[in-house]
């Protein structure tokens, strides 16, 4: 994808985010044709957002690790987006709901990387990537898009829009976690005091650590790698919940704690 077309697509997505508005879809001449073009647009979009809001890169989000999310976004494999400090909040968080055109709520397991993850000829697995994890963080990702509906997405467009990432709310990091069975670990999404959705870690590629391993294997394809201190949120443990302004939301991760969000 040429630079002019990349910049044009990123500019459109940037303006739509700033105006909190949507269009039917990206114009044909700005639509990414493959993942490579999608990641080029993503890079430019994230650069523009961080320049505007004063943010810095803090890690990655993984999208479409859940069967429901894959169906919603018309893809059969994960992709990644970028986390930035300017859209990251500590729990309990109070965020203006009017800043976003769609309020998609996803309770997610996140990890902090302890040391640089080298490129490996043998793919990382949930058993080997665990050696690079410093801590586990219960989290909520706020997702949304700039288009008329979820049905307009394909993988390159999803990637270009920073994998529909809007904001990330992080709970307290847990350092003693190796005894946990992430696949069986239950998660509840509680909205205005009532349980709205239930899920567990197995909904995330069978195990959130498997999603983390996928990212460690995927990033080198795009000239990137996981580094010490990176934060990675691994995808929703439940169906995506569409919230409303005024909602009080809490994701309960049991012994890992909870994450709270008020949409003001």
Image (cartoon, helix red, strand yellow):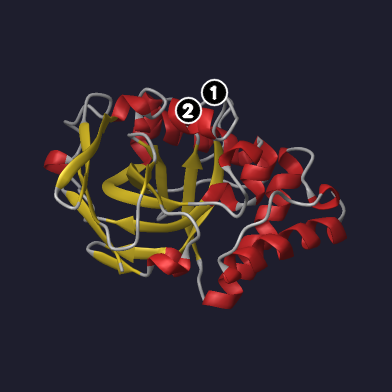
Q: Residue at x 59, y 63 (%)?
A: 21
- Residue 122 figure quarter: top right
The percent coordinates of residue 64 (x first, y second) are 50, 34
Residue of label 2: 124
**Quarter containing the C terminus:** bottom left
Viewer-closest of 213 and 146: 146
Measured as percent of width and height from the top left, residue 145 is found at: 56, 52
User: Callout 1 environment at 10 Å: few (<14), some (14 to 19), or many (20+)?
Assistant: few
Task: Please name whichever residue, 123 or 232, is drawn nearer the observer in this view of the structure.
Answer: 232
Q: On the picture, is 260 further left or further right than 231?
A: left
Q: Is residue 150 left or right of residue 10?
A: left
For the residues labelled 2 and 1, the Cα–Cα distance comes to 6 Å
Q: In this view of the protein, can residue 234 be seen by the observer?
A: yes
Res 122 label: 1
Q: Are marks 2 and 1 in contact (CB under 8 Å)?
A: yes
| Residue situated in front as seen by the camera: 116 or 89 | 89
Q: Measured from the top left, where is residue 142 in percent x and y?
A: 41, 53
Total marks shown come to: 2
Does the rendering let one see residue 85? no
Disc ID at residue 40 = none
């Amino acid at each position: 994808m040429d630079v002019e077309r990349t910049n044009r697509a990123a500019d459109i997505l940037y303006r739509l985010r700033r105006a909190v508005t949507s269009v039917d879809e990206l114009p044909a001449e700005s639509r990414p044709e493959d993942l490579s073009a999608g990641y080029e647009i993503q890079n430019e979009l994230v650069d523009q957002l961080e320049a505007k809001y004063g943010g810095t890169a803090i890690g990655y989000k993984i999208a479409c690790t859940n069967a429901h999310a894959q169906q919603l976004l018309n893809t059969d494999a994960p992709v990644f987006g970028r986390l930035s400090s300017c859209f990251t909040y500590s729990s309990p968080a109070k965020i203006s709901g009017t800043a976003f055109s769609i309020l998609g709520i996803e309770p997610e397991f996140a990890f902090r990387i302890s040391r640089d993850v080298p490129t490996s000829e043998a793919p990382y697995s949930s058993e080997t990537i665990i050696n690079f994890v410093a801590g586990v963080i219960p989290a909520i990702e706020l997702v949304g898009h700039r288009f008329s509906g979820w049905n307009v997405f394909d993988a390159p467009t999803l990637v270009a829009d920073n994998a529909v990432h809007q904001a990330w709310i992080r709970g307290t990091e847990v350092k003693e976690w190796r005894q946990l069975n992430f696949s069986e670990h239950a998660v509840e999404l509680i909205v205005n005091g009532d349980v709205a959705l239930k899920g567990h870690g197995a909904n995330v590629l069978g195990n959130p650590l498997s999603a983390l391993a996928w990212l460690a294997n995927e990033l080198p394809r795009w000239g990137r790698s996981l580094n010490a201190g990176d934060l990675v949120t691994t995808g929703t443990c439940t169906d995506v919940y569409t919230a409303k302004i005024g909602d009080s939301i809490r994701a309960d991760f049991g012994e890992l704690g909870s994450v709270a969000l008020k949409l003001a």
